[in-house]
Amino acid sequence: MLQNLKMVQELIEKLALLSEEELRELLELANQYINTDPKSSLTKSREALERIVYDIYRREIGEEPKRVELGMMLNQNQFTRKIETRILKLMNHVRDMGNMGPHSNVGRVEEKDASRVLDTLSDIITWYIEKYILEPKEENDDQDACRIAASDDKYTAEQEFQLGEKYCSEHDYLEAIYHYQNAAELGSTAAQFQLGMFFIVGNGVKESLPDAEYWFECAAERGHKEAQYELGLCYCYRRNEKRDLLKALDWFTKAAQQGHALAQTRLGIMYKQGEGTKPDILKSIRWLRKATEQNEPNAQVFLGRMYEEGIDIQRDYSKAIKLYFTAASKGEIQAQYFLADMYKNGKGTPKDDEKAQEWLKKAKRQESFTWDQDEFKAYMDGAEKGYDISQFNLALIYASGSSIVEKDDAEAVKWYRKAAEQGYELAQVNLGASYEYGQGIEQSDIEAFKWYRKAAEQGNAVAQYCLAQMYAFGKGIEQDDTKAVKWCIKSAKQGYAKGQVFLGLVYASGGGGIERDDIEAVRWYRKAAEQGNAVGQYCLAEMYASGLGLEQDYSEAETWYRKAAEKGHAGAQFSIGEMYEFGRAVEQDVAEAENWYRKALEHGFEKAKEKLRI
Protein backbone atom coordinates (compact mmCIF):
# COMPACT_ATOMS: atom_id res chain seq x y z
CA MET A 1 0.00 0.00 0.00
CA LEU A 2 1.06 3.59 -0.53
CA GLN A 3 2.30 5.36 2.54
CA ASN A 4 0.50 8.50 1.53
CA LEU A 5 -2.25 7.95 -1.02
CA LYS A 6 -3.78 11.28 -0.06
CA MET A 7 -0.60 13.13 -1.04
CA VAL A 8 -0.50 11.44 -4.47
CA GLN A 9 -4.16 12.21 -5.20
CA GLU A 10 -3.64 15.84 -4.20
CA LEU A 11 -0.64 16.08 -6.48
CA ILE A 12 -2.59 14.64 -9.42
CA GLU A 13 -5.32 17.25 -8.87
CA LYS A 14 -2.72 20.01 -8.46
CA LEU A 15 -0.99 19.06 -11.72
CA ALA A 16 -4.34 19.14 -13.50
CA LEU A 17 -5.02 22.66 -12.21
CA LEU A 18 -1.57 23.71 -13.39
CA SER A 19 -2.16 22.20 -16.86
CA GLU A 20 0.84 19.88 -16.43
CA GLU A 21 -0.96 17.11 -18.35
CA GLU A 22 2.00 14.95 -19.34
CA LEU A 23 3.35 14.80 -15.80
CA ARG A 24 -0.14 14.31 -14.35
CA GLU A 25 -0.78 11.36 -16.67
CA LEU A 26 2.53 9.67 -15.80
CA LEU A 27 1.91 10.08 -12.06
CA GLU A 28 -1.62 8.73 -12.40
CA LEU A 29 -0.43 5.67 -14.34
CA ALA A 30 2.35 5.02 -11.82
CA ASN A 31 -0.30 5.10 -9.10
CA GLN A 32 -2.74 2.85 -11.00
CA TYR A 33 -0.14 0.18 -11.76
CA ILE A 34 1.10 -0.30 -8.19
CA ASN A 35 -1.18 -3.22 -7.34
CA THR A 36 -1.55 -4.82 -10.78
CA ASP A 37 1.86 -4.29 -12.39
CA PRO A 38 4.56 -2.92 -10.03
CA LYS A 39 7.26 -3.02 -12.73
CA SER A 40 5.21 -0.79 -15.00
CA SER A 41 4.60 1.53 -12.06
CA LEU A 42 8.38 1.85 -11.59
CA THR A 43 8.80 2.58 -15.30
CA LYS A 44 6.19 5.35 -15.23
CA SER A 45 7.78 6.88 -12.11
CA ARG A 46 11.11 6.93 -13.89
CA GLU A 47 9.56 8.53 -16.99
CA ALA A 48 7.94 11.19 -14.82
CA LEU A 49 11.29 11.94 -13.20
CA GLU A 50 12.98 12.17 -16.61
CA ARG A 51 10.31 14.67 -17.69
CA ILE A 52 11.00 16.79 -14.57
CA VAL A 53 14.80 16.63 -14.85
CA TYR A 54 14.65 17.53 -18.56
CA ASP A 55 12.57 20.63 -17.80
CA ILE A 56 14.84 21.71 -14.92
CA TYR A 57 17.92 21.19 -17.10
CA ARG A 58 16.61 23.56 -19.78
CA ARG A 59 15.65 26.18 -17.18
CA GLU A 60 18.95 26.04 -15.24
CA ILE A 61 21.47 25.48 -18.06
CA GLY A 62 19.61 27.49 -20.67
CA GLU A 63 19.97 24.93 -23.45
CA GLU A 64 18.81 21.47 -24.50
CA PRO A 65 20.78 18.52 -23.06
CA LYS A 66 22.94 16.70 -25.60
CA ARG A 67 21.00 13.53 -24.79
CA VAL A 68 17.60 13.41 -23.12
CA GLU A 69 18.62 10.50 -20.92
CA LEU A 70 18.08 10.58 -17.18
CA GLY A 71 21.40 9.05 -16.13
CA MET A 72 23.38 11.39 -18.39
CA MET A 73 21.65 14.49 -17.04
CA LEU A 74 22.03 13.44 -13.39
CA ASN A 75 25.75 12.84 -13.90
CA GLN A 76 26.56 16.31 -15.20
CA ASN A 77 28.18 18.30 -12.41
CA GLN A 78 27.34 21.63 -14.05
CA PHE A 79 23.67 20.73 -13.76
CA THR A 80 23.54 18.81 -10.46
CA ARG A 81 25.31 21.65 -8.60
CA LYS A 82 22.13 23.65 -9.11
CA ILE A 83 19.93 21.08 -7.32
CA GLU A 84 19.90 20.87 -3.52
CA THR A 85 21.55 17.75 -2.10
CA ARG A 86 18.39 16.35 -0.51
CA ILE A 87 16.44 16.44 -3.77
CA LEU A 88 19.34 15.05 -5.78
CA LYS A 89 19.48 12.03 -3.46
CA LEU A 90 15.77 11.44 -3.97
CA MET A 91 16.15 11.72 -7.76
CA ASN A 92 18.95 9.16 -7.82
CA HIS A 93 16.86 6.80 -5.70
CA VAL A 94 13.92 6.98 -8.15
CA ARG A 95 16.28 6.55 -11.09
CA ASP A 96 17.97 3.47 -9.59
CA MET A 97 14.71 1.81 -8.57
CA GLY A 98 13.04 2.87 -11.81
CA ASN A 99 15.66 0.95 -13.76
CA MET A 100 14.15 -2.25 -12.35
CA GLY A 101 11.00 -1.63 -14.35
CA PRO A 102 12.17 -2.21 -17.93
CA HIS A 103 14.58 -5.02 -17.02
CA SER A 104 12.98 -8.41 -16.61
CA ASN A 105 16.09 -10.06 -15.16
CA VAL A 106 16.06 -8.20 -11.84
CA GLY A 107 13.68 -10.65 -10.19
CA ARG A 108 10.26 -10.01 -8.74
CA VAL A 109 9.33 -6.38 -8.17
CA GLU A 110 6.91 -6.08 -5.28
CA GLU A 111 4.08 -3.66 -4.64
CA LYS A 112 6.00 -2.10 -1.76
CA ASP A 113 8.93 -1.27 -4.08
CA ALA A 114 6.68 0.65 -6.46
CA SER A 115 4.88 2.28 -3.54
CA ARG A 116 8.06 3.63 -2.00
CA VAL A 117 9.34 4.97 -5.31
CA LEU A 118 6.05 6.75 -5.86
CA ASP A 119 6.27 8.28 -2.37
CA THR A 120 9.74 9.58 -3.21
CA LEU A 121 8.61 10.84 -6.61
CA SER A 122 5.77 12.70 -4.90
CA ASP A 123 8.29 14.56 -2.72
CA ILE A 124 10.26 15.52 -5.84
CA ILE A 125 7.15 16.70 -7.69
CA THR A 126 6.06 18.81 -4.71
CA TRP A 127 9.47 20.48 -4.67
CA TYR A 128 9.45 20.90 -8.46
CA ILE A 129 6.03 22.58 -8.46
CA GLU A 130 6.94 25.02 -5.70
CA LYS A 131 10.32 25.92 -7.21
CA TYR A 132 9.66 25.96 -10.94
CA ILE A 133 5.94 25.94 -11.77
CA LEU A 134 4.06 28.17 -9.40
CA GLU A 135 3.78 31.88 -10.17
CA PRO A 136 2.09 34.54 -7.98
CA LYS A 137 -1.64 34.69 -8.71
CA GLU A 138 -4.40 37.02 -7.60
CA GLU A 139 -6.51 35.83 -4.70
CA ASN A 140 -9.88 34.36 -5.58
CA ASP A 141 -12.58 32.38 -3.87
CA ASP A 142 -11.25 29.03 -4.99
CA GLN A 143 -9.56 27.63 -1.86
CA ASP A 144 -7.62 24.97 -3.72
CA ALA A 145 -6.24 27.49 -6.19
CA CYS A 146 -5.31 29.80 -3.30
CA ARG A 147 -3.34 27.03 -1.64
CA ILE A 148 -1.50 26.14 -4.84
CA ALA A 149 -0.56 29.77 -5.42
CA ALA A 150 0.42 30.52 -1.82
CA SER A 151 3.52 32.69 -1.72
CA ASP A 152 6.12 32.83 1.02
CA ASP A 153 4.71 36.06 2.46
CA LYS A 154 1.26 34.60 3.15
CA TYR A 155 2.40 33.40 6.58
CA THR A 156 5.51 34.08 8.59
CA ALA A 157 7.83 31.23 9.55
CA GLU A 158 6.41 31.26 13.09
CA GLN A 159 2.82 31.15 11.82
CA GLU A 160 3.62 28.23 9.51
CA PHE A 161 5.34 26.44 12.38
CA GLN A 162 2.36 26.92 14.70
CA LEU A 163 0.06 25.53 12.01
CA GLY A 164 2.36 22.52 11.78
CA GLU A 165 2.16 22.10 15.56
CA LYS A 166 -1.63 22.31 15.43
CA TYR A 167 -1.99 19.61 12.77
CA CYS A 168 0.64 17.45 14.44
CA SER A 169 -1.31 17.51 17.72
CA GLU A 170 -4.36 16.38 15.73
CA HIS A 171 -2.32 13.53 14.17
CA ASP A 172 -2.83 14.96 10.69
CA TYR A 173 0.80 14.45 9.74
CA LEU A 174 0.39 15.26 6.05
CA GLU A 175 -0.89 18.75 6.83
CA ALA A 176 1.69 19.15 9.59
CA ILE A 177 4.53 18.34 7.19
CA TYR A 178 3.17 20.79 4.62
CA HIS A 179 3.37 23.67 7.12
CA TYR A 180 6.60 22.54 8.76
CA GLN A 181 8.18 22.45 5.30
CA ASN A 182 7.00 26.00 4.59
CA ALA A 183 8.34 27.17 7.94
CA ALA A 184 11.63 25.31 7.46
CA GLU A 185 12.19 26.91 4.08
CA LEU A 186 11.55 30.28 5.70
CA GLY A 187 14.35 29.54 8.14
CA SER A 188 12.55 28.13 11.20
CA THR A 189 15.05 25.90 13.03
CA ALA A 190 12.23 24.44 15.14
CA ALA A 191 10.45 23.33 11.94
CA GLN A 192 13.68 21.96 10.47
CA PHE A 193 14.17 19.91 13.63
CA GLN A 194 10.60 18.61 13.51
CA LEU A 195 11.01 17.54 9.88
CA GLY A 196 14.16 15.66 10.87
CA MET A 197 12.22 13.81 13.58
CA PHE A 198 9.41 12.99 11.12
CA PHE A 199 11.94 11.34 8.81
CA ILE A 200 13.43 9.40 11.74
CA VAL A 201 10.13 7.89 12.92
CA GLY A 202 8.24 7.84 9.62
CA ASN A 203 5.22 9.98 10.48
CA GLY A 204 3.59 11.15 7.24
CA VAL A 205 6.75 10.37 5.28
CA LYS A 206 8.81 7.26 4.75
CA GLU A 207 11.67 6.76 7.20
CA SER A 208 14.87 8.20 5.74
CA LEU A 209 18.10 8.78 7.65
CA PRO A 210 19.65 10.92 4.85
CA ASP A 211 16.62 13.24 4.86
CA ALA A 212 16.65 13.38 8.65
CA GLU A 213 20.34 14.27 8.61
CA TYR A 214 19.69 17.02 6.06
CA TRP A 215 17.06 18.77 8.19
CA PHE A 216 18.91 18.23 11.47
CA GLU A 217 22.01 19.77 9.95
CA CYS A 218 20.05 22.79 8.71
CA ALA A 219 18.88 23.46 12.26
CA ALA A 220 22.09 22.36 13.99
CA GLU A 221 24.26 24.75 12.03
CA ARG A 222 22.11 27.59 13.32
CA GLY A 223 22.53 26.52 16.93
CA HIS A 224 19.46 24.34 17.61
CA LYS A 225 20.75 22.13 20.43
CA GLU A 226 18.18 19.34 20.04
CA ALA A 227 19.08 19.09 16.34
CA GLN A 228 22.77 19.05 17.23
CA TYR A 229 22.17 16.12 19.59
CA GLU A 230 20.06 14.19 17.06
CA LEU A 231 22.63 14.80 14.33
CA GLY A 232 25.26 13.36 16.64
CA LEU A 233 23.09 10.25 17.06
CA CYS A 234 22.73 9.97 13.29
CA TYR A 235 26.50 9.88 12.87
CA CYS A 236 26.73 7.27 15.67
CA TYR A 237 24.14 4.90 14.27
CA ARG A 238 24.35 5.21 10.49
CA ARG A 239 23.40 2.05 8.60
CA ASN A 240 25.00 0.92 5.32
CA GLU A 241 27.52 3.75 5.77
CA LYS A 242 30.50 4.07 8.05
CA ARG A 243 29.78 5.65 11.38
CA ASP A 244 31.60 8.94 11.94
CA LEU A 245 32.30 9.16 15.65
CA LEU A 246 34.49 12.24 15.20
CA LYS A 247 31.55 14.20 13.77
CA ALA A 248 29.25 12.71 16.39
CA LEU A 249 31.60 13.94 19.12
CA ASP A 250 31.67 17.41 17.54
CA TRP A 251 27.88 17.77 17.44
CA PHE A 252 27.41 16.30 20.93
CA THR A 253 29.95 18.86 22.18
CA LYS A 254 28.04 21.74 20.58
CA ALA A 255 24.79 20.55 22.17
CA ALA A 256 26.42 19.83 25.54
CA GLN A 257 27.93 23.31 25.69
CA GLN A 258 24.36 24.63 25.44
CA GLY A 259 23.35 22.52 28.43
CA HIS A 260 21.79 19.53 26.64
CA ALA A 261 21.87 16.83 29.34
CA LEU A 262 21.70 13.79 27.06
CA ALA A 263 24.52 15.20 24.92
CA GLN A 264 26.57 15.73 28.09
CA THR A 265 25.96 12.09 29.01
CA ARG A 266 27.02 10.93 25.56
CA LEU A 267 30.20 12.98 25.78
CA GLY A 268 30.98 11.52 29.20
CA ILE A 269 30.64 7.97 27.85
CA MET A 270 32.60 8.69 24.66
CA TYR A 271 35.51 10.24 26.58
CA LYS A 272 35.49 7.32 29.01
CA GLN A 273 35.54 4.68 26.26
CA GLY A 274 37.70 6.57 23.77
CA GLU A 275 35.07 6.77 21.03
CA GLY A 276 35.92 9.39 18.41
CA THR A 277 38.71 10.65 20.65
CA LYS A 278 41.44 9.46 22.99
CA PRO A 279 40.18 8.33 26.41
CA ASP A 280 40.10 11.27 28.83
CA ILE A 281 38.76 10.35 32.25
CA LEU A 282 38.78 13.93 33.55
CA LYS A 283 36.60 15.16 30.68
CA SER A 284 34.40 12.09 31.05
CA ILE A 285 33.71 12.78 34.73
CA ARG A 286 33.25 16.51 34.11
CA TRP A 287 30.55 15.98 31.48
CA LEU A 288 28.84 13.19 33.42
CA ARG A 289 28.66 15.41 36.51
CA LYS A 290 27.15 18.24 34.47
CA ALA A 291 24.47 15.83 33.24
CA THR A 292 23.77 14.44 36.73
CA GLU A 293 23.31 18.00 38.00
CA GLN A 294 20.37 18.13 35.57
CA ASN A 295 19.11 14.79 36.95
CA GLU A 296 19.78 12.90 33.70
CA PRO A 297 19.24 9.25 34.75
CA ASN A 298 21.60 7.62 32.22
CA ALA A 299 24.47 9.78 33.48
CA GLN A 300 23.54 8.98 37.08
CA VAL A 301 23.69 5.24 36.36
CA PHE A 302 26.96 5.44 34.40
CA LEU A 303 28.72 7.64 36.97
CA GLY A 304 27.26 5.56 39.81
CA ARG A 305 28.73 2.45 38.22
CA MET A 306 32.14 4.10 38.05
CA TYR A 307 31.96 4.98 41.77
CA GLU A 308 30.76 1.48 42.67
CA GLU A 309 33.47 -0.34 40.76
CA GLY A 310 36.26 2.15 41.40
CA ILE A 311 37.32 2.22 37.75
CA ASP A 312 39.38 5.34 36.95
CA ILE A 313 37.91 7.00 40.03
CA GLN A 314 38.14 6.34 43.78
CA ARG A 315 35.54 3.81 44.85
CA ASP A 316 32.75 5.47 46.83
CA TYR A 317 29.70 3.34 47.60
CA SER A 318 27.85 6.21 49.28
CA LYS A 319 28.04 8.33 46.11
CA ALA A 320 27.10 5.35 43.97
CA ILE A 321 23.98 4.51 45.97
CA LYS A 322 22.89 8.15 46.01
CA LEU A 323 23.12 8.34 42.21
CA TYR A 324 21.36 4.98 41.78
CA PHE A 325 18.57 6.01 44.14
CA THR A 326 17.91 9.27 42.28
CA ALA A 327 17.74 7.50 38.91
CA ALA A 328 15.78 4.52 40.26
CA SER A 329 13.17 6.82 41.79
CA LYS A 330 12.48 8.18 38.30
CA GLY A 331 11.89 4.67 36.93
CA GLU A 332 15.32 3.90 35.46
CA ILE A 333 15.28 0.08 35.36
CA GLN A 334 19.04 -0.50 35.37
CA ALA A 335 19.42 1.79 38.39
CA GLN A 336 16.71 -0.17 40.22
CA TYR A 337 18.63 -3.42 39.66
CA PHE A 338 21.90 -1.85 40.83
CA LEU A 339 20.20 -0.34 43.86
CA ALA A 340 18.69 -3.71 44.78
CA ASP A 341 22.19 -5.22 44.62
CA MET A 342 23.59 -2.46 46.86
CA TYR A 343 20.96 -3.18 49.54
CA LYS A 344 21.43 -6.94 49.17
CA ASN A 345 25.19 -6.80 49.68
CA GLY A 346 25.30 -3.86 52.09
CA LYS A 347 27.38 -1.60 49.85
CA GLY A 348 27.17 2.02 50.98
CA THR A 349 24.24 1.10 53.25
CA PRO A 350 23.39 -1.54 55.87
CA LYS A 351 22.22 -4.82 54.36
CA ASP A 352 18.47 -4.74 53.83
CA ASP A 353 16.89 -7.73 52.06
CA GLU A 354 13.44 -6.19 52.24
CA LYS A 355 14.51 -3.05 50.35
CA ALA A 356 16.54 -5.16 47.92
CA GLN A 357 13.44 -7.18 47.04
CA GLU A 358 11.32 -4.04 46.80
CA TRP A 359 13.61 -2.48 44.18
CA LEU A 360 14.05 -5.78 42.37
CA LYS A 361 10.27 -6.14 42.02
CA LYS A 362 9.98 -2.58 40.71
CA ALA A 363 12.60 -3.29 38.07
CA LYS A 364 10.96 -6.52 36.95
CA ARG A 365 7.53 -4.87 36.72
CA GLN A 366 8.97 -2.28 34.36
CA GLU A 367 11.20 -4.64 32.39
CA SER A 368 8.62 -5.30 29.69
CA PHE A 369 8.19 -2.55 27.13
CA THR A 370 5.80 0.18 28.21
CA TRP A 371 4.66 1.44 24.82
CA ASP A 372 1.26 3.08 24.87
CA GLN A 373 -1.52 2.15 22.45
CA ASP A 374 -0.76 4.99 20.03
CA GLU A 375 2.92 4.06 19.78
CA PHE A 376 2.08 0.41 19.20
CA LYS A 377 -0.38 1.33 16.44
CA ALA A 378 2.18 3.63 14.85
CA TYR A 379 4.79 0.85 14.78
CA MET A 380 2.24 -1.64 13.46
CA ASP A 381 1.16 0.78 10.75
CA GLY A 382 4.75 1.47 9.72
CA ALA A 383 5.65 -2.22 9.85
CA GLU A 384 2.77 -3.18 7.58
CA LYS A 385 3.88 -0.53 5.11
CA GLY A 386 7.31 -2.13 4.99
CA TYR A 387 9.41 0.24 7.12
CA ASP A 388 12.32 -1.73 8.59
CA ILE A 389 12.74 0.33 11.77
CA SER A 390 9.05 -0.06 12.61
CA GLN A 391 9.23 -3.80 11.92
CA PHE A 392 12.24 -4.13 14.23
CA ASN A 393 10.60 -2.16 17.06
CA LEU A 394 7.42 -4.19 16.69
CA ALA A 395 9.49 -7.37 16.97
CA LEU A 396 11.09 -6.07 20.18
CA ILE A 397 7.64 -5.48 21.68
CA TYR A 398 6.52 -9.04 20.84
CA ALA A 399 9.84 -10.50 22.06
CA SER A 400 9.48 -8.95 25.53
CA GLY A 401 5.73 -8.57 25.87
CA SER A 402 4.03 -5.44 27.16
CA SER A 403 0.77 -4.11 28.50
CA ILE A 404 -0.39 -3.94 24.85
CA VAL A 405 0.46 -7.48 23.66
CA GLU A 406 1.56 -10.72 25.27
CA LYS A 407 5.08 -12.05 24.74
CA ASP A 408 5.11 -13.96 21.44
CA ASP A 409 8.50 -15.21 20.19
CA ALA A 410 7.07 -16.51 16.90
CA GLU A 411 5.52 -13.13 16.09
CA ALA A 412 8.80 -11.45 17.03
CA VAL A 413 10.67 -13.69 14.59
CA LYS A 414 8.17 -12.85 11.86
CA TRP A 415 8.89 -9.12 12.16
CA TYR A 416 12.63 -9.57 12.72
CA ARG A 417 12.69 -11.46 9.43
CA LYS A 418 10.84 -8.75 7.51
CA ALA A 419 13.25 -6.08 8.74
CA ALA A 420 16.29 -8.35 8.31
CA GLU A 421 15.39 -9.11 4.70
CA GLN A 422 15.55 -5.37 4.04
CA GLY A 423 19.10 -5.24 5.39
CA TYR A 424 18.37 -3.89 8.89
CA GLU A 425 21.42 -5.12 10.77
CA LEU A 426 19.98 -5.16 14.32
CA ALA A 427 17.11 -7.32 13.10
CA GLN A 428 19.60 -9.62 11.37
CA VAL A 429 21.47 -10.07 14.66
CA ASN A 430 18.28 -10.84 16.60
CA LEU A 431 17.02 -13.20 13.90
CA GLY A 432 20.35 -15.00 14.02
CA ALA A 433 20.05 -15.33 17.79
CA SER A 434 16.48 -16.62 17.44
CA TYR A 435 17.75 -19.40 15.16
CA GLU A 436 20.79 -20.14 17.34
CA TYR A 437 18.72 -20.60 20.51
CA GLY A 438 15.49 -21.82 18.93
CA GLN A 439 13.35 -18.96 20.23
CA GLY A 440 10.11 -18.66 18.30
CA ILE A 441 11.46 -20.86 15.50
CA GLU A 442 13.11 -24.25 15.01
CA GLN A 443 16.78 -24.16 16.05
CA SER A 444 19.20 -23.96 13.13
CA ASP A 445 22.90 -23.14 13.35
CA ILE A 446 23.06 -22.82 9.56
CA GLU A 447 20.38 -20.13 9.51
CA ALA A 448 21.92 -18.44 12.56
CA PHE A 449 25.28 -18.29 10.79
CA LYS A 450 23.66 -16.85 7.64
CA TRP A 451 22.00 -13.95 9.45
CA TYR A 452 24.97 -13.21 11.72
CA ARG A 453 27.17 -12.99 8.63
CA LYS A 454 24.83 -10.52 6.91
CA ALA A 455 24.91 -8.21 9.93
CA ALA A 456 28.65 -8.72 10.49
CA GLU A 457 29.38 -7.68 6.91
CA GLN A 458 27.53 -4.43 7.61
CA GLY A 459 29.93 -3.77 10.50
CA ASN A 460 27.79 -4.83 13.46
CA ALA A 461 30.19 -5.64 16.32
CA VAL A 462 27.82 -8.04 18.12
CA ALA A 463 27.26 -10.03 14.93
CA GLN A 464 31.00 -10.11 14.25
CA TYR A 465 31.55 -11.64 17.69
CA CYS A 466 28.76 -14.18 17.15
CA LEU A 467 30.19 -15.08 13.75
CA ALA A 468 33.63 -15.57 15.34
CA GLN A 469 32.05 -17.97 17.83
CA MET A 470 30.33 -19.90 15.05
CA TYR A 471 33.64 -20.34 13.20
CA ALA A 472 35.52 -21.19 16.41
CA PHE A 473 33.14 -24.01 17.38
CA GLY A 474 32.07 -25.11 13.90
CA LYS A 475 28.42 -24.20 14.39
CA GLY A 476 26.56 -23.90 11.08
CA ILE A 477 29.86 -23.81 9.20
CA GLU A 478 33.10 -25.79 9.04
CA GLN A 479 35.35 -24.97 11.99
CA ASP A 480 37.98 -22.38 11.01
CA ASP A 481 40.19 -20.73 13.64
CA THR A 482 41.66 -18.23 11.19
CA LYS A 483 38.25 -16.85 10.21
CA ALA A 484 37.18 -16.90 13.85
CA VAL A 485 40.13 -14.68 14.75
CA LYS A 486 39.48 -12.39 11.76
CA TRP A 487 35.91 -11.62 12.90
CA CYS A 488 36.93 -11.50 16.55
CA ILE A 489 39.46 -8.74 15.78
CA LYS A 490 36.81 -6.72 13.91
CA SER A 491 34.43 -6.94 16.86
CA ALA A 492 37.07 -6.15 19.48
CA LYS A 493 38.36 -3.11 17.62
CA GLN A 494 34.84 -1.67 17.66
CA GLY A 495 34.85 -1.82 21.44
CA TYR A 496 32.56 -4.83 21.96
CA ALA A 497 33.58 -6.24 25.36
CA LYS A 498 32.87 -9.91 24.59
CA GLY A 499 34.91 -9.62 21.41
CA GLN A 500 37.75 -8.09 23.41
CA VAL A 501 37.70 -10.98 25.91
CA PHE A 502 37.69 -13.50 23.06
CA LEU A 503 40.67 -11.78 21.44
CA GLY A 504 42.47 -11.74 24.78
CA LEU A 505 41.95 -15.50 25.06
CA VAL A 506 43.34 -15.95 21.54
CA TYR A 507 46.50 -14.03 22.43
CA ALA A 508 46.81 -15.90 25.73
CA SER A 509 46.88 -19.29 23.98
CA GLY A 510 47.88 -18.52 20.39
CA GLY A 511 46.17 -19.91 17.32
CA GLY A 512 44.25 -18.87 14.23
CA GLY A 513 47.35 -17.30 12.74
CA ILE A 514 48.21 -15.37 15.92
CA GLU A 515 51.26 -16.14 18.07
CA ARG A 516 50.90 -16.26 21.82
CA ASP A 517 51.42 -12.80 23.34
CA ASP A 518 50.60 -12.32 27.03
CA ILE A 519 51.10 -8.55 26.86
CA GLU A 520 48.47 -8.26 24.11
CA ALA A 521 46.19 -10.60 26.05
CA VAL A 522 46.41 -8.28 29.07
CA ARG A 523 45.69 -5.26 26.87
CA TRP A 524 42.45 -6.73 25.50
CA TYR A 525 41.33 -8.17 28.85
CA ARG A 526 41.79 -4.72 30.38
CA LYS A 527 39.66 -3.04 27.68
CA ALA A 528 36.80 -5.44 28.43
CA ALA A 529 37.30 -5.25 32.19
CA GLU A 530 37.11 -1.46 32.19
CA GLN A 531 33.71 -1.73 30.48
CA GLY A 532 32.49 -3.81 33.40
CA ASN A 533 32.64 -7.20 31.67
CA ALA A 534 32.93 -9.82 34.44
CA VAL A 535 34.84 -12.37 32.32
CA GLY A 536 37.32 -9.69 31.26
CA GLN A 537 37.77 -8.67 34.89
CA TYR A 538 38.36 -12.28 35.93
CA CYS A 539 40.86 -12.89 33.12
CA LEU A 540 42.76 -9.69 33.97
CA ALA A 541 42.88 -10.75 37.62
CA GLU A 542 44.31 -14.12 36.58
CA MET A 543 47.10 -12.37 34.65
CA TYR A 544 47.96 -10.25 37.70
CA ALA A 545 47.89 -13.30 39.96
CA SER A 546 50.17 -15.34 37.68
CA GLY A 547 52.41 -12.50 36.54
CA LEU A 548 51.80 -13.21 32.86
CA GLY A 549 52.13 -10.21 30.58
CA LEU A 550 52.81 -7.87 33.50
CA GLU A 551 54.41 -7.83 36.93
CA GLN A 552 52.74 -10.13 39.46
CA ASP A 553 50.54 -8.08 41.80
CA TYR A 554 48.15 -9.84 44.19
CA SER A 555 46.64 -6.54 45.27
CA GLU A 556 45.56 -5.74 41.70
CA ALA A 557 44.46 -9.34 41.24
CA GLU A 558 42.23 -9.10 44.31
CA THR A 559 40.73 -5.84 43.04
CA TRP A 560 39.70 -7.34 39.72
CA TYR A 561 38.64 -10.70 41.16
CA ARG A 562 36.34 -8.81 43.52
CA LYS A 563 34.77 -6.75 40.72
CA ALA A 564 33.98 -9.93 38.81
CA ALA A 565 32.89 -11.81 41.93
CA GLU A 566 30.40 -9.10 42.85
CA LYS A 567 28.81 -9.63 39.43
CA GLY A 568 28.34 -13.33 40.23
CA HIS A 569 31.35 -14.77 38.39
CA ALA A 570 31.85 -18.14 40.10
CA GLY A 571 35.55 -18.52 39.22
CA ALA A 572 36.29 -15.09 40.65
CA GLN A 573 34.36 -15.92 43.82
CA PHE A 574 36.43 -19.07 44.24
CA SER A 575 39.66 -17.11 43.70
CA ILE A 576 38.61 -14.50 46.30
CA GLY A 577 38.08 -17.41 48.66
CA GLU A 578 41.64 -18.56 48.03
CA MET A 579 42.94 -15.04 48.63
CA TYR A 580 41.34 -15.11 52.10
CA GLU A 581 42.42 -18.69 52.76
CA PHE A 582 46.11 -17.98 52.07
CA GLY A 583 46.18 -14.30 53.03
CA ARG A 584 47.16 -12.93 49.65
CA ALA A 585 46.62 -9.14 49.48
CA VAL A 586 44.03 -9.51 52.29
CA GLU A 587 44.20 -10.53 55.92
CA GLN A 588 43.90 -14.29 56.27
CA ASP A 589 40.33 -15.17 57.24
CA VAL A 590 39.16 -18.79 57.00
CA ALA A 591 35.51 -17.91 57.70
CA GLU A 592 35.45 -15.32 54.92
CA ALA A 593 37.18 -17.80 52.61
CA GLU A 594 34.42 -20.33 53.25
CA ASN A 595 31.82 -17.64 52.62
CA TRP A 596 33.24 -17.02 49.12
CA TYR A 597 33.62 -20.75 48.41
CA ARG A 598 29.92 -21.19 49.20
CA LYS A 599 29.02 -18.37 46.83
CA ALA A 600 31.09 -20.01 44.10
CA LEU A 601 29.36 -23.35 44.73
CA GLU A 602 25.94 -21.70 44.58
CA HIS A 603 26.92 -20.46 41.12
CA GLY A 604 27.88 -23.95 40.00
CA PHE A 605 31.65 -23.98 40.66
CA GLU A 606 32.07 -27.66 41.63
CA LYS A 607 35.72 -27.30 42.64
CA ALA A 608 34.51 -25.36 45.69
CA LYS A 609 33.21 -28.66 47.17
CA GLU A 610 36.79 -29.76 47.79
CA LYS A 611 37.48 -26.60 49.80
CA LEU A 612 34.28 -26.98 51.80
CA ARG A 613 34.88 -30.75 52.17
CA ILE A 614 31.38 -31.49 50.94
Image (cartoon, rainbow, N blue to C red):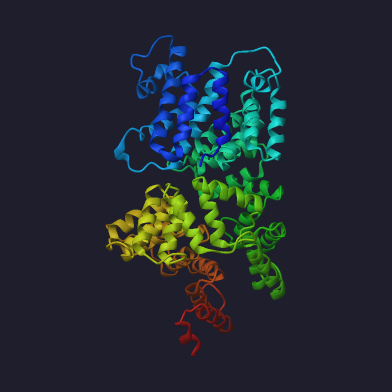
At 60% from the left edge and 57% from the top edge, which residue is drawn? 306
Above or below for 29 versus 150:
below
Above or below for 67 versus 123:
above
Above or below for 68 versus 405:
above
Which quarter of the figure has residue 114?
top left
At 58% from the left edge and 62% from the top edge, which residue is drawn? 401
Residue 507 visible in the displayed image = no
Residue 45, x across and y down, in percent: 43, 30
Quick one: 400 or 147, which is closer to the camera?
Answer: 147
Farthest residue, direction bottom = 614
In the figure, is residue 557 to the left or right of 172?
left
Residue 614, x across and y down, in percent: 49, 90
Quick one: 321 or 594, which is closer to the camera?
Answer: 321
Above or below for 266 versus 135:
below
Residue 106, x across and y down, in percent: 32, 40
At 64% from the left edge and 24% from the top edge, which residue is drawn? 187
Quick one: 499 or 322, which is closer to the camera?
Answer: 499
Residue 183, x across and y down, in percent: 65, 26
In the figure, is residue 578 to the left or right of 473?
right
In the figure, is residue 55 to the left or right of 288?
left
Task: Count numbered badges in the picture.
Answer: 0
Which quarter of the figure has residue 240?
top left
Residue 60 visible in the displayed image = yes
